[in-house]
Amino acid sequence: MTSSQKIDFILLAAKSLHENGLPTHRVEDFIQKLCVSTQVEAELFTTPGSIFASIEKDGVKYPHLVKVSQEGDLNLEKIDAIQEICKQISERKIDFPDGIQQLKTVNQLKSRYSNWLMILFFGLSTGSAACVFGGDLPEIICSLVIGLGIGGFNSLLIYFPRLGKVFVLISAIWACCIAAFFDHIYINFQRDIATVCGLIILIPGFSFTVSITEMVNNHLIAGLTRFTNAFITFAMIAIGIAVGMKFMGHINLSNPSLAIAELSSWVKWVALFFVPLGFMILFKAKQKDFIWILLACWCSYFSYVYGRTIFSEPVSVFLASLLLGIVSNLFSLVKKRNSSLLLVPGMILLVPGSLGFFSISHLVNSDVVAGLQTALSMLSTAMALVFGIIFSNILVKAER
C-alpha cells in the first residue's frame, strides 16, 4: 500500500458521494472523518462542480482538483454502498486497491429499476400526493396523468439530451394544459392541487431547503449555487404555467358538468403507502429499505398534521423535522447506515416547494405583494425545517 493509493481512494470516494447526490457539507464531513481514520492529513473544499483538496504526502502538501459532474440524481443505494466501502477501509477489512476497484464497480452499476417502472411511479407518486394533500378523484387522475407524461419526457432525455435544458419548461406547460382540460370537465375541480402535485417531483423545494442548510453550515458558494438553481427552476415552472394558460385560453372548451363524490377516508391510507413506494423508486433505494422510507414519510407527515392542530405552520414544520431528524439519526446509530435513507424521503413531504411555485406564479401575474408574502412564508418554513434538522443533530449524532 502506498500513499498514492490512499489519496486516489479518498478523492474517488469524495467524487462518488458528490455525484450521487450527497450535499457538499456532508461530503466534506464524511471525507474528513475518513482521512482521520486512515491517517491522512488533508483539507477539503467542495463546490457544486469540483472538489479541491490539499493532501500531505511524504511531509509535503500537494493540491488536487477533481471535476465533478452536476447531472447525477440522488441515488441512495449507491451512497449507502460507497459509505460501506469506506467503513471497511477504516476498519482495515479491505486494502486501498480493493476499495478503489469496489468504488469503480459501484459507480458503474445500472439502476435496478427500468425506465417503464420509473415512468409508472412518476404517475403513482404524483397521483398519491394529490390524494394526501386533499385532492379528490379528478385531482388524483389529473396529477397521475401529469406525472406519467413527465416520466415519459424524462425517459426521452436519454435519446435527446439537448431537451434537458427545457425539460422543466415543457413539463410545466404539459401540467398546465392537462389541469386546464380537467378544469373544464369537473365541477369544483381544485386546479392548484392537481398542478402542484403533478409537478411535485420537479418543484425544487428540497434543493431550496438543502441550499439553506449548506449556507447555515458555512458552505456559501455551494448554498448560493443551489439556491440560484432552485430559483431558476421555480421561474421556469412559473413561465411554463403562464404559457400553458395562454395557450389553453385560445381553446374553446365546454363548461364543467361532471361532479364526483368525495373519496372515503381510507383512500388516503392507500396513498400514504404509494408515496413512499414512489420515493423508493425515484431515489433508487433498495426494495428491502421500503419499510424505513415508509416509516420516515409517516413520521414526518403525521407529526406535521398533528402539529398544525396546535401550532402555527413554521412551528409545526420545525417540530416535524426535529422528530424526523432524531428518528433518522437513531436509525443510523442502531443500523450503522446512512441517515439520509430516512431523512430525504421524509423531508420531501415537509419542504415548502409549493409555496415557491405560488410565489413565482404571483410575480409572473404581476401580483407583487402576494408573491413577496408567499416567498417570505416559504423562507420561514424552510428555515424552520433546516433548524429542526440542525437541532436533531445536536441532540442525537448520526453514525453517518
Image (spheres, helix red, strand yellow):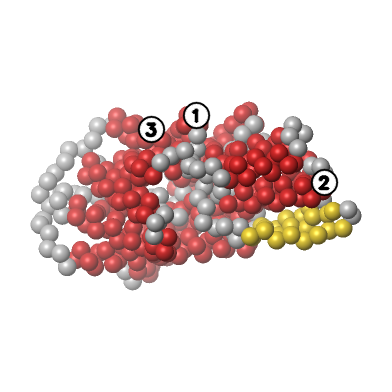
- Residue at (40% x, 50% y) in the render: 201
To which quarter of the image does residue 392 belong? top right
Q: Which residue is mark 2?
A: 2
Sequence-first disc among 1 and 3 = 3
Q: Is residue 317 left or right of residue 10?
A: left
Disc 3 residue type?
Phe
Q: Is residue 185 above or below residue 394?
A: below
Q: Quadrant of residue 133?
A: top left
Of the pair 309 and 387, the residue shown nearer to us: 387
Q: Quadrant of residue 172 in the image?
A: bottom left
Q: Please give the count of numbered marks on the rendered protein.
A: 3
Q: Where 172 falls versus 83 (above or below)? A: below
Q: Residue at x 10, y 49 (%)?
A: 257
Location of mark 1 (residue): 288
Label 3: which secondary element: helix
Q: Residue furthest right?
A: 59
Disc ID at residue 353? none
User: Residue 273 has which mark?
Assistant: 3
Where does the image place residue 67, in percent across and percent down from the top left? 63, 60
Q: Residue 348, how many percent across, how many down?
A: 46, 45
Q: Quadrant of the C terminus?
A: top right
Q: Is residue 155 visible?
A: yes
Circles 2 and 3: CB distance less than 8 Å? no
